[in-house]
Image: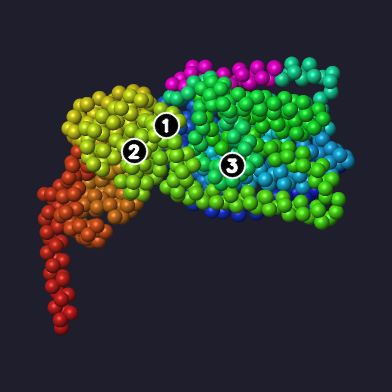
Amino acid sequence: MTKNRILLPTAREGLFAVTAILILLLIIYSNSFHAPFHYDDFLNITDNPNIHLREFSLDSLKNILYGKKLNHTYDTRPLSYLTFALNYYFSRNNTFGYHIVNLTIHCITSILLFLLIHITLKLQNPATDSLKNIYPISLFSTLFWASHPIQVTAVTYIVQRMASMSAMFYILSMLFYIFFRVHAEAKQKGIGFLLFMLAGILAIAGKENALMLPISIFLYDVIIIQGLPQEKNKKHILLFLLILTGMLILGSFLFSPASILNGYKIRYFTMLERLLTEPRVIIFYISLLLYPVSSGFTLLHDIEISRSLFSPWSTLPSIALLCSFLYFGVYSSRKYPVIGFGILFFIFNHLIEGSFLPLELIYEHRNYLPSIFFFLIFAIMLTRPIDHLSKTRFMRTLFLIAGIILLVSQSHTTYMRNHLFLSGVRLWQDNSRKSPNLSTPFLNLGRSLWEIGRTEESIRMLEKAEKINRFNNKIQHRTLIFNKALHDAYVTRQYSKAGSAFEEALHINNGSPYIWAELSRIHMIQGDRQKAMGLVEHALSFWPDNPDLLFAKSVILLKENKLDSALEAIRKVTILDPDQTDYRIAMAEIYRKRKEWEKSISIWNQVSESEPDFPQAHLALIELHARLGQTGNCRHHLDSLMKNKQGLSIMEQIRLSMKNPETKIYLPDLAVLQPVIQSYQKDRLLLNRGQKKIEKK
């Protein structure tokens, strides 16, 4: 039996652990599979043409490497975006497949964590004479970590697959490193090293915080595998400094000083203020891990920025407490190596997202990786008192029942938290109650209400967000102004007011091609097509392949009857996103104006199939079939219009389609439609009279 085999649990123990982990996670996440997209999901997935994979071509795969970036610069998380692209390929915007992948990753990560904890305890206690409960400690530590409600935002919140997948490969890399370090045969050492490197690269390709892997591996080797003999301390310190220097060099390629400084331009806090605030954030994370009640968890937390060491008063104590934890981690590494390593692992793996980078101050999903040894620390600390108190079988059973009750209670909190993610309105109502002095939850609640047609409530939420005027960054402030401008433009039709609001949004931050496209559209509605085209061309110089801008350009060219140029622009758009209804309509209308009736019919049929109750599609098809003399097809679509859910007559639907012509892509041709409709109505009248005569007889 090899040394590696001894480190692993028995087959029976492993099977029970895997079964327990899978059953528990399937139960507590069973209500999450139909949760819709939320918050950053839209930016990264649904509204991100780069990951809308429809075919496996070189260009499509190249686009995935851009992540969510619109200016053709490569993203630092290509693996995460590749998995989103594959999900999109198989299920488009149906979230069920995304949730299956997310939960699968969480299950695999939990199983790998169980193995890592078990191996770690075995390495420290090979004869099991100083620690007799390796298996139950490994299993319970894993179950408490996996079922904790703080992990919901890394599992149910789809986009944070980035955090969970990176952690999965991170743990896998550590396991391969242990295999490499403790295996006796040279050939197997080589395989272990290659797998360790590959898993590490995949972890970093999932999310940048995996850059801490070399430090974690170093600490694990020094503290757990080698131990800390006094004569090697200087050598270890030197090696640690060399690894840290190498990480700083590697990190400089991912986070250049210029990009870090530019990142703070959209923040309402400075780098120093962030550095002062993050110790308080990490202490808050610890409180959530120790006391997992539902009232403490939410997607967006409201945390006061530390403006100095004494404002707020908890800043300096938090820094002192965190330094104490760091000291205790180093101090205890010799006598209690697993505890010391677990503390250092937690602190160091919070460094990237909890230091000088211009990121948001606080997110729960940032604990997914740092907390993997958190519950192991407390399990070890409680082992000796429990062993001392549980001399009898009754007491051991009592402690086991208490542990199960805590686990079930925590799991119930996780299950109920998943329930919130089933509705955007429900999620943001909960968040706005827990962070009532933060604007962003009300902003997102407004968006969710808008999406389900509750526009008046939506505007009230946006006004409340504006009144609070406390955003995490300038982009969110810009989004508020943009959303209100959309309401002014397309609900109340106050175009001048909407145009001014779009300009204000661009003044705050001009890095959104969508705002440029909407401002161009406003000028087009107001009849200034030259101004509209100027705005689009200016924005296209920065984002040449942006579908919103190309679509706006194609519509302007269509209105100006420049059909060849319009067709060239819309073809680029439909390559990027062929499923978008507005893009299809524009192409169909261009073909109609070019008198390419059959091509126009083909595209309008696609629109009609995807949206059967869309009146413009039926009107266009009636007109096109009439031009080709296909009266039977005309009657089919006339019948569909008569069944319109709004109860409008055909002529009323036509008049509605011709209202505000600058906002409409397709405008019906009355000269073609009227004779067809009159003939249809006359036939229906005769048919009704015939039916009445039959009924009388």
Instruction: Look at 72% across and 52% down and name the residue there.
Output: 402
**Tag nearer the camera, 3 or 2:** 2
Given contact means CB atoms under 8 Å apart, are the residues at marks 1 and 2 in contact? no
Left or right: residue 188 compared with residue 581? right
Nearer-the-camera pick, 178 or 638: 178
Which badge, 1 or 2, comes first in the chain's sequence? 2
The percent position of residue 507, horizontal first and vertical second, equals 33, 24
Q: Mark 1 points at which residue?
A: 470
- What secondary structure is the magenta-colored segment mainly? helix
Q: How crowded is mark 1: few (under 14 residues within 10 Å), some or many (20 or more)?
A: some
Determine the CA span between mark 3 and mark 1. Answer: 25 Å
Q: What stretch is highlighted in magenta?
A: 241-265
In-image side of 127 versus 606 (left or right): right
Marks 3 and 2 sit apart, C-alpha to C-alpha, by 31 Å
Amino acid type of disc 2? Glu
Question: Split into 4 quadrants, where in the image is the N terminus?
Answer: top right
* First in residue order: circle 3 vs circle 2: 3
- Residue 463: give its label: 2
Q: Which residue lies furthest to the bottom in this view?
A: 697
What residue did someone put label 3 on? 150
- Who is closer to the viewer here, 665 or 234? 234
Secondary structure of the residue carrying numbered label 2: helix
Mark 3–mark 2 CB contact (< 8 Å): no
Q: Residue at x 82, y 30 (%)?
A: 335
- The kind of residue tagged 3 is Ile
